[in-house]
């Protein structure tokens, strides 16, 4: 369950939990994403479980981007991130909760499956904090301290990219438009353009 996030600025600080549950809401919890696009959510969860760490993009005070490796876990209904409270990325998110998330690519010759996600973070209650700490301890062998920030990601959009025999299969979901049919693309290296495959 969520608690209202405390932030130091009002420019982007509206918590998604204050936006209500109507159809106009632009963010979704992980469990809502699972219900709306179960196969895509399962593919994304599999990638997150394989790597544990993701690259998270945050917004610096001067508006420039910052990229940081962060451990990510699906815990119950939430996609959870845990950060040292005094870290620069945690300070970025306290000021502006918007983020992007990218799974690692470890082989340039065979990228496999990638996950890209856009959303915002919010604080969680003590029950979710404890469940997240237990999940991290079980899977990674270390336990975050109570002073750390436990952040749930409210999802605006998710894309899963799968490379299959030289073709890129792109499947996307967002809260406004829902799940879109997969698109198959092939890179035209000479012109540096991805072209649709019929």
Image: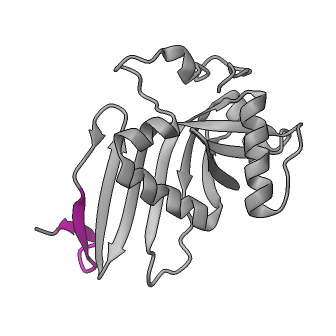
* Residue shown at the point (22%, 52%) measured from the top left: 181
Q: Is residue 33 left or right of residue 145?
A: left
Q: Main secondary structure of the magenta part?
A: strand
Marks counted in the figure total 0
Picture coordinates of residue 115, whole percent (x, y): 47, 58
Q: Position of residue 132 (x, y in %)?
A: 73, 44
Quadrant for residue 16, please give it: top right
Locate the N terminus by quadrant.
top right
Q: Quadrant of residue 17?
A: top right
Q: Residue at x 52, y 63 (%)?
A: 47
Colour scheme employed for the rendering of this structure:
one colour
Is residue 87 among what the camera can see?
Answer: yes
Front one among 88 and 45 = 45
Which quadrant of the view contains residue 54? Answer: bottom right
Residue 116, above or below 178: below
- Residue 36 is situated, as x and y percent measured from the top left of the image, at 35, 39
Q: Is residue 163 left or right of residue 127?
A: left
Of all residues, the one furthest to the left in this rendering is 198
Is the C terminus in the top left, top right, bottom left or bottom right quadrant?
bottom left
Q: Position of residue 60 (x, y in %)?
A: 68, 40
Q: Is residue 169 above or below residue 149?
A: below
Identify which residue, 73 or 156, lies in the foreground. Answer: 73
Extent of the magenta region: 182-196
Q: Nearer the viewer, residue 15 or 9?
A: 15
Q: Residue at x 85, y 52 (%)?
A: 143
Residue 67 visible within the image: no
Q: Is residue 167 magenta?
A: no
Horizontal arrangement in the rendering, residue 125 relative to residue 184 (left or right): right
């Amino acid at each position: 369950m969520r608690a209202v996030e405390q932030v130091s600025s009002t420019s982007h600080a509206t918590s998604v939990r204050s936006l209500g549950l109507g159809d106009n809401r632009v963010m979704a919890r992980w469990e809502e994403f699972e219900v709306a696009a179960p196969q895509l959510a399962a593919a994304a969860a599999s990638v997150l479980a394989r790597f544990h760490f993701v690259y998270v993009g945050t917004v610096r005070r001067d508006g420039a981007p910052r990229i940081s490796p962060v451990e990510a876990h699906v815990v119950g209904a939430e996609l959870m991130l845990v950060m040292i409270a005094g870290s620069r990325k945690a300070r970025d998110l306290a000021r502006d909760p918007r983020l992007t998330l990218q799974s690692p690519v470890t082989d340039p010759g065979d990228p496999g499956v990638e996950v890209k996600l856009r959303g915002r973070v919010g604080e969680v209650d003590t029950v979710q904090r404890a469940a997240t700490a237990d999940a991290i301890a079980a899977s990674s062998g270390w336990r975050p301290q109570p002073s750390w920030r436990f952040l749930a990601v409210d999802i605006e959009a998710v894309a899963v990219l799968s490379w299959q025999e030289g073709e890129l299969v792109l499947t996307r979901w967002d809260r406004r438009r829902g799940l879109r049919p997969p698109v198959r693309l092939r890179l035209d290296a000479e012109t540096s353009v991805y072209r649709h495959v019929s």
